[in-house]
Structures are given as C-alpha cells and as structure tokens.
Image: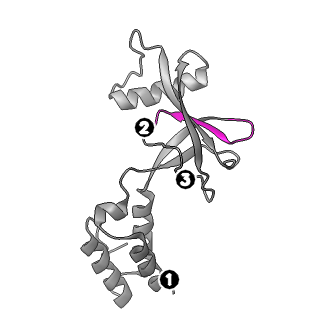
Amino acid sequence: MKGFPKVIKTKSDLVNTFKMAKKGSLKKADWLEAVAKLENQNWIMCPVISLSEDRKAVTIMFCAEAAAGQRVKNGAVYPTIQSIETVEVDKSTTDTENAATEGQEAAREGTESGQVAAGQNTATHTVLKLSKAVNMGTTEIGIPAAVSFYDRLGISKEEVEEMKGELEA
C-alpha cells in the first residue's frame, strides 16, 4: 500500500482515494483492502466463552451493546439475537474460564497481575440465544458497534457498495 494514506478519517478522504484508485494513481486492491478494514470496525469482536450443544446459545463476557433483534457476525453466518440473558458466574468454576476471565478483567482494569480483588468472586457474562447455530469451532462473535464507520464518515452503505462495485468490475 505504498503511497496510500495511513488513515481514512472523512468522507472526502474516502471519495478522493476512490477517485485516485479509479484513475490508477493508487492500486484498486489497496483501496478495497482499506474499505474492508473500515467495514470491520462495524463489529465488536467478543471472545466466546462457551457454546450450547446445539450452538444456538453463546456465552460471552458482558457486552452492553448486544440487543435482541440484532444480527451478529459469525464468519459468513449472520444469526439474529432472539433473547439476551445476563448471568453472574462464580470465578472459581474452572481453571480455563478463570484464566480467560482474569485476563480480560486485568485488561479492562488496567492491572498487570490479573489478581481478583477481595469481594469480587463473580463475573458477569452475557448469554445470547440465536436464531440459527453458529459455525463449529467458533472462538469469537461480532456484535454490531453502536456507531458504524458509515455514520462516522457521513456516507451511506449504498454509496460505499457502489464505489466498491465500480472498482471490482
């Protein structure tokens, strides 16, 4: 991506780089790759703690952005959230869950030790009941971000798709 801007911050940046790619000043593949990176910002990727046997119930760390009716990203599968349940889980359940929970807690609290503070023996998890099963071996699931990159740049998804279509043709 030599010569390509490091960041695209505004709609005019996106449109100008599109025009440059269309003229041949920038590589079309570089522009399409940059748009793909921007589109990935539309999702909050949450690690999966556990899956139900039928893979329609997914447990993740607490995620306030998850809401019933949203479509979640799981590879090429986009199931809809049917219901959400918030549960308190004892941190001493299993060593594997403890390691994951303590690591995420430490990252969130900014501590390096990962030690659990006195009186905090529970962790909050979000259980998502989905419309269809997620992929086998799923390790993370995408929850829609509150603000999409389209909103941040002030451009519609249709405009971006139209530009992508022109370059891919």
Residue 64 is labelled as 2
Q: Nearer the viewer, residue 12 or 20?
A: 12
Q: In this view, does 140 lie above or below 154?
A: above
Q: Please name the residue that numbered disc 1 is placed on.
A: 168
Classify mark 1: residues with Cα within 10 Å, few (<14), some (14-19) or many (20+).
few
The quadrant in which the N terminus is found is bottom left
Q: Position of residue 119 (x, y in %)?
A: 41, 9
Residue 66 is labelled as none
Q: Please name the residue that numbered disc 3 is placed on.
A: 71
Q: Are marks 2 and 3 in contact (CB under 8 Å)?
A: no
Earlier sequence position, callout 2 versus callout 3: 2
Position of 106 with respect to 82 (left or right) is: left
Position of 47 with respect to 129 (left or right) is: left
Q: Which residue is drawn at 39% across and 9% down?
A: 118
Quadrant position of residue 17: bottom left
- The amino acid pointed to by label 3 is Arg
Earlier sequence position, callout 3 versus callout 1: 3
What is the magenta range? 52-63
